[in-house]
Image (tube, grey):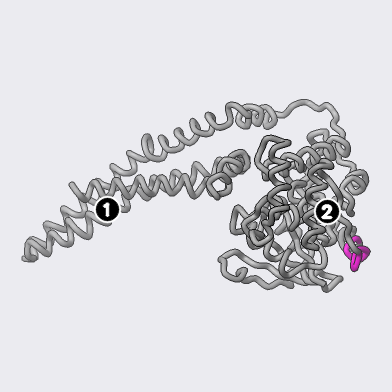
């Protein structure tokens, strides 16, 4: 049997994969892309487990989402283990609602639930199971607990059929049902056709366009936004019914989160932090390192110039070595310390968890440009590299 392991990034998916398969795994790349592909045998069950790339949804905004969606639609696994980060259940269950529409048996592995106790939050797994319509098991991939229970649920659910659950308002559900009946397809594809997904342009009949237009006129917003908002409304309702919160003393981390992740001030604070990072790496410390490297290279160049002249080297060869090779190398080496400091600062922010939070906050903005929030760090580093290359060009031009 073929089982897919699906979940958000940093939800403990790789740890769970290693626990279930041990060392019995193959690693390669997905066809056509340089994204790691892991396949292993589940110990004691001998079923194939395929570790899909970490994603937040099955909408094709990133390469990872394209790979995962293509796999579940074309290779049709017999079962999906959806590992859910219980500390951010609203974000995690968005993907879950899409997986439940594929007519494939889904098992929810509620990971890191033990961390919620420190926050005074309790998730009723049994109630969540009834609400969402599938089996839910509490695990801790880090501590290795709940793994045997997960395997037992896999055994119990082999060969079971799935019935998709209606989660939207009746007017949206009616339009989805019309498309399902018109083309004889599953619920997930019907929703994607309604959303005018680029993969299903051949299905854009007059009836589909009329359905989309009716809903957009009723809700006064784009169809993708209608579906996304409806999913979140459903998820928030579930969260409120399955979680209980005890009052505990607010931690320093919670207080900092309220400041740095505030809906209004989060982005301005991020810009200030990035300015300070650039100022530190390029200005205060960076300028010192550039001057130091430049001084060392210049001294070495002049020393080598004297040696070459004393040896009787021609003027053009001296200029080639000193003004060309040595000076050019020095110009490149000059900004290496700046990049080291920049990476060090970003690593510190990543360790604190700030970068992953900002990535999630900026995800919606970046998706308008066909990107995801994960491109934030390459974007920052790319700007610095562009600036450094520009400085090298200007210096060489002088």
Q: Residues within 10 Å of mark 2 (few under 14, many from 20)?
A: many
- The range drawn in magenta is 153-160
Magenta segment, principal secondary structure?
Answer: helix
Q: Nearer the viewer, residue 235 or 361?
A: 235
Badge 1: residue crowd in 10 Å (few <14, some 14–19, many ≥20): many
Residue 81 percent coordinates (x, y): 80, 59
Q: Is residue 393 magenta?
A: no
Label whose residue precedes the other's in the sequence (2 or 1): 2
| Element type where label 2 sits in the image | strand
Position of residue 301 measured from the top left corner of the image (x, y, whole percent) = 19, 54
Question: Where is residue 57 drawn, in percent x and y?
Answer: 69, 51
- The label number, if any, that marks residue 172 in the structure image: none
Instruction: Residue 346 in the image: state x and y as whole percent.
Output: 51, 43
Residue in the picture at 53% in, 34% down? 270
Which residue: 37% across, 50% down? 336
Residue under circle 2? 108
Q: Nearer the viewer, residue 314 or 164?
A: 164
Does 142 appear above or below 170? below
* Label 2, label 1: how far apart the Cα atoms are: 55 Å
- Quarter of image, res 319: bottom left
Local SS, label 1:
helix
Q: Which residue is mark 1?
A: 330
- The one of 34 and 137 positioned closer to us in this rendering: 34
| Apparent side of residue 125 relative to residue 279 in the rendered image (left or right) | right
Task: Residue 9: tell me if it is visible.
Answer: no
Residue sticking out furthest to the front: 206
Q: Is residue 17 left or right of residue 309?
A: right
Please report the residue visible at 73 percent of the width from the left and 53 percent of the height from the top: 207
Is residue 246 rendered to the left or right of residue 380?
right
User: Seen in the image, is 196 located left or right of residue 113?
Assistant: left
Q: Please state which of the two labelled residues, at mark 2 or mark 1, is closer to the viewer.
A: 2
């Amino acid at each position: 049997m073929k089982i897919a392991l699906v979940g958000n990034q940093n939800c403990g998916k790789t740890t769970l994969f290693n626990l279930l398969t041990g060392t019995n795994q193959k690693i390669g790349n997905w066809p056509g892309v340089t994204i790691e592909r892991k396949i292993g045998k589940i110990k004691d069950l001998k079923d194939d487990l395929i570790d899909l790339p970490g994603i937040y949804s099955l909408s094709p905004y990133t390469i990872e989402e394209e790979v995962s969606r293509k796999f579940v639609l074309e290779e049709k696994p017999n079962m999906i283990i959806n590992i859910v980060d219980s500390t951010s259940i609203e974000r995690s269950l968005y993907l879950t609602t899409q997986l439940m529409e594929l007519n494939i048996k889904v098992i929810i592995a509620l990971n890191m639930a033990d961390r919620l106790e420190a926050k005074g939050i309790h998730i009723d797994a049994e109630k969540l199971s009834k609400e969402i319509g599938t089996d839910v098991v509490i695990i801790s991939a880090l501590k290795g607990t709940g793994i045997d229970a997960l395997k037992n649920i896999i055994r119990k659910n082999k060969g079971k059929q799935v019935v998709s659950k209606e989660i939207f308002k009746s007017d949206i559900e009616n339009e989805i049902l019309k498309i399902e009946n018109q083309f004889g397809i599953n619920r997930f594809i019907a929703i994607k056709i309604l959303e005018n997904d680029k993969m299903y342009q051949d299905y854009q009949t007059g009836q589909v366009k009329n359905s989309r237009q009716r809903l957009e006129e009723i809700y006064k917003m784009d169809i993708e936004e209608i579906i996304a908002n409806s999913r979140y409304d459903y998820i928030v309702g579930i969260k409120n019914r399955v979680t209980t919160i005890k009052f505990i003393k607010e931690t320093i981390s919670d207080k900092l989160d309220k400041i740095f992740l505030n809906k209004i001030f989060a982005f301005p604070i991020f810009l200030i932090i990035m300015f300070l990072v650039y100022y530190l790496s390029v200005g205060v410390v960076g300028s010192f390192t550039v001057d130091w490297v430049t001084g060392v290279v210049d001294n070495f160049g002049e020393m080598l110039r004297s040696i070459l002249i004393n040896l009787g080297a021609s003027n053009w060869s001296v200029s080639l070595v000193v003004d060309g090779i040595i000076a050019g190398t020095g110009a490149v080496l000059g900004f290496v310390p700046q990049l080291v400091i920049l990476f060090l600062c970003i690593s510190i922010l990543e360790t604190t968890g700030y970068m992953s939070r900002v990535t999630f906050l900026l995800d919606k903005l970046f998706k308008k440009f066909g990107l995801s929030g994960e491109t934030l760090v390459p974007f920052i580093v790319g700007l610095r590299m562009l600036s450094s290359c520009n400085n090298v060009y200007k210096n060489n031009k002088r």
